[in-house]
Image (cartoon, helix red, strand yellow):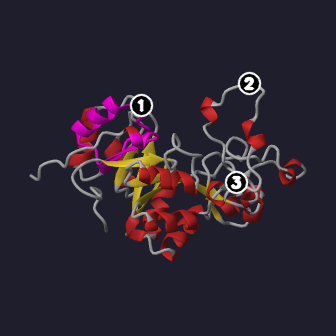
Amino acid sequence: MPSLTLFNDAPAIWAHRGGRSLAAENTLRALRMGRSAGARGCEIDVQLTRDAQVIVLHDLNLLRTTNAGAHPRFASGPPALPWLHTLEDIRALCADVFPRRTCTGSRHHKPWRELPDPCPEDVRVPTLAQALRLTRQLDMWLNVEIKDLARAAPPELAGRVVERVLEEVAAEGMEDRVIVSSFSATCVLRSKEAAPGVLAALLTPHGFRGDVERALRAVRADAWHPGHRGLERDAVRAALAAGYGVNPYTVNDAADMLRLAEWGVTGIVTDRPQDAPRFAARPKS
């Protein structure tokens, strides 16, 4: 199994959703931009389509990050929920909605209605297989966050998401370049049971005050991915001392990155890899 220090003895920079300050989130373009900005790995989100294909998408609907709200195929069909549509349907959309948070104009302006036609391939909703191939070409790691579909998608799909992700990882020969992560303890445990040699991490929300080591042991996790707000140094150092990787998210302030690096974290997940300090390797003990 690969080491959770991953690259050297300095914290690894992970580009969140590919580095969504640089390009449309969770697209192949974002992965390339994240790498160009110096990230050593990228974090992406995955879920399933109606035909059980693994796509890279954060939200449990398609409206925020694609032009589904204006696309004729979706206007007259089922709601824009990924598991109600096939991969072919979703690949017809354009995901070049960037930067959504800083769009100018009135609140009625809908930039996703004005996306390019034809849509460039690198800003369509990608498959996990495409993301894996690209990260291999770019000599990167991939942190694959599995969305918890248990309360949303039909049970026959929700129950297959871990299996399908691991099938894609194995098919691309990327078992030693992937960390599977999830807020769902069930997903993390299923991943470790099915593929013990693939690293897995448990995500916890900002301000988590539970028993970290107990939670990690229960799901056989290799790493803890905590929200950085409210994160305490003692909790980080205890997890590190117990042999777990610690990769906080989503850290966009350079001062916070430096503080977490001083605490000894193994990685930092950020929207802004271009602003991350270039950490020197820690001395060998």
Q: Position of residue 111 (x, y in %)?
A: 73, 37
The local crowd at label 2, few if under 14, some if 14 to 19, many if 20 or more residues have their Cα within 10 Å, is few
Q: Position of residue 253 (x, y in %)?
A: 38, 31
The residue lying toward the viewer, choosing from 262 and 52, is: 262
Answer above or below: position of 205 versus 225. above
Corner quadrant of residue 206: top left
Amino acid found under the numbered disc labelled 1: Gly
Q: Position of residue 199 (x, y in %)?
A: 38, 62
Name the residue beneath numbered marker 3.
Answer: 153
The residue lying toward the viewer, choosing from 219 and 263, is: 263
- The mark tally for this picture is 3
**Residue under the image location 72 percent in, 57 percent down:** 83
**Residue under the image location 31 percent in, 29 percent down:** 255
Quote the CA–CA distance across marks 2 and 3.
31 Å
Name the residue beneath numbered marker 1.
Answer: 207
The residue lying toward the viewer, choosing from 214 and 266, is: 266
Q: Which residues are magenta?
A: 245-274
Q: Position of residue 273 (x, y in %)?
A: 41, 43
Of all residues, the one furthest to the right in this rendering is: 76
Circle 1 SS class? loop
Residue 275 seen anywhere in this rendered image of the structure: yes
